[in-house]
Amino acid sequence: MSSTGLTIAVPRGALFDDTLDWLERLGVPTGEVRTNDRKLLFEDVGLITMRPSDVPTYVAAGAADLGVTGKDVLMEQGDAAPNGSGRDVYELRDLGFGRCTMVVASVAGPDRAAEALRRLGVIRVATKYPRVAAAHFERTGRQVEIIEVKGSVELAPLTGLVEAIVDLTATGTTLRENNLVIRETLAVCTARLIANPVAHKLKAAAIDELLERSRAS
Amino acid sequence: MIFPIPSGTRDVLPDEMGELRTLTERLRAVFSKAGYGEVYTPALEYEGVITRGPLGGARPAYRVFDENGEVLVLRSDMTVPIARLVGSRYQASEPPLRFAYFAHCYRGVRPQRGQPREFLQAGIELVGAAAPGGTAEAVTVLCNALDAAGLMRYRVGIGDAALYPALMEALEVPHEQRPRLLSELGHGDFVGLENALAELSIDERSLELLLRVPQLRGGPDILHGPPGPVADAVAGLRSIHALLAADVAERVIFDLGLSRAPGYYTGAVFEVYDPAVGMPIGGGGRYDHLLGQFGRELPAVGFALEVEKLHQALAAEERLAEAVR
């Protein structure tokens, strides 16, 4: 059993280093996690590593008690379950790091999205966040056709596949390099500490102690 | 040739059915011994009847038209049908009334999450027994049922649906802001709650209470901490605790942030947790105004266990016991 008595899901990728630094400040040793990028399960320190978008899945199922993931992932995967069984995961703390914005962007110059909406009545939008994108355009009363892509979203408007994209950007560099400009900002996304609802009750003392150390650090 | 069935539904084959049957018989024996008579109500009900009360998360998801064009729904829980049954068939009966049920219920799912559309609920409703006595009886039957099922490591979390509204009232949170705070809390989004609170123009101490009180959970000692504004709800929880026998009381976790999805709960609410299953395996609470919607203004309390999840928890405990051996 780890020193915290908890299993924590750690996202590999952009949030990886900041998450490990945060854990280190809480007194969780992260040396082996940093050096061994093939191993996924570090039982002696209570850490498991995975893609950020898998973190809510593991936490919701109770395979991890806590997890760190981006608000973008939580927004896309939704909050309350429609079957009345309540929420999948609790969102305990805004960890502050990994700050990005969710934006609508299109090719620089006259906005092709606006033109498509005016003349064709619908904007084609490429994104890795189909639910977030659909909800945003629905809220703002615009018809869209959402095209879900898995890889570089920036490619889609450059090839004429779509008129606009919804994507996450940290510095805007990739957008600029691809001649895309930000047209709208949807949300600011940071890393969040999430908890399994059952673990939040049954391991209350351990979780609260960790939160307390996090506040102090 | 494979003929599919809808996602979230299952065929049950003899091995599993045998285990489920053993489990439900154990539960049935406990309910029966405690004086709860088993009832059954139709899976299909008139939509106009079943949606009389506030339903929250238990809103029916499946509708069909009958030959007269009436809208029928597949029941999403058994509490509302039993409220209807009491109003219609027990108009003059002397309370308290005790009912048990074993019935499949139907809810909508989000795709790819392994959520069931159809699931078996085993539960009781105790009608006409007010808090705290009725609540303590329901919690006791719940723990006896879980003990009889053979579940070792379960805990019952108890909170109060009226606690946070009372806190908001006492701290004079503007009415138009209250639904948002309740919604954030209901989703377990404490970051969202903190952000919503930051937008309110109330003093620092009130903010702290609104954020910290719903995160208090643990043994009965937490019921002595919280100050003034939530005193009534907390006193209610203390009086339930005082009525529980020692073996039941040691199963209980008090949780001042607990809120349950169906909108009809008015007082104490509870959920059943087991470390082997990542979600509650059952729950319930007080619904003192639901019966009034069906013509009998009686306080009531009940719980439902999700039999398939309970079965999963039992199987996980067996695996753990074997691993230790």
Image (cartoon, coloured by chain):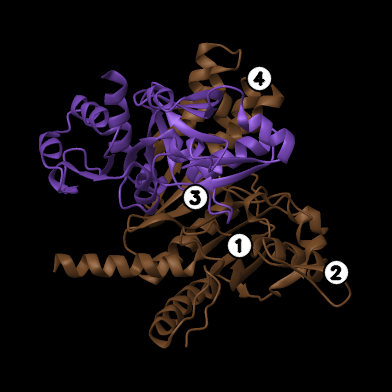
Chain colours: A purple, B brown
Q: Label 4 to label 3, Cα distance in Å?
A: 33 Å
Chain ID of residue with mark 3:
B
Residue at 30% from the left image edge and 66% from the top image edge: B316
Q: Earlier in the sequence, mark 4 or mark 1?
A: 1
Name the spot of residue A83 as percent of width and height, x first: 58, 56
At numbered mark 1, what does the secondary structure look like: helix, strand or loop? loop
N-term mark: 4 or 3: 4
Residue B267 shows in the view: no
Image label count: 4
| Along the viewing direction, whichever of A36 and B208 lies nearer the viewer | A36
Of all chains, the one bearing label 4 is B
Q: Does residue A64 sit above or below B29 in this rendering?
A: above
Residue A77 position (above or below residue B200): below
Query: Are marks 4 and 3 in one subunit?
Result: yes
Quadrant of the rendered image containing residue A71: top left
| Residue that mark 1 sits on | B107
Q: Residues within 10 Å of mark 3 (few under 14, many from 20)?
A: some
Disc 4 residue type (three-letter)? Glu
Residue B70, which numbered label? 2
Q: Determine crowd level at label 4: few under 14, some 14-19, many 20+ residues with C-alpha closer than 10 A.
A: few
Q: Earlier in the sequence, mark 2 or mark 4?
A: 2
Q: Chain of mark 1?
A: B
Tag 3 and tag 2, C-beta contact below 8 Å = no
Tag 1: residue type?
Arg
Query: What residue would you read off at disc 3?
Result: B243
Q: Which residue is mark 4?
A: B172
Q: Are marks 3 and 1 in contact (CB under 8 Å)?
A: no
Q: Position of residue A198 (x, y in %)?
A: 39, 49
Look at 39% across and 24% down and name the residue there: A177
Residue B145 versus residue B63: which sits nearer the camera? B63
Regarding residue A202, the answer to whether it shows in the image is: yes
Disc 3 to disc 1, C-alpha distance: 35 Å
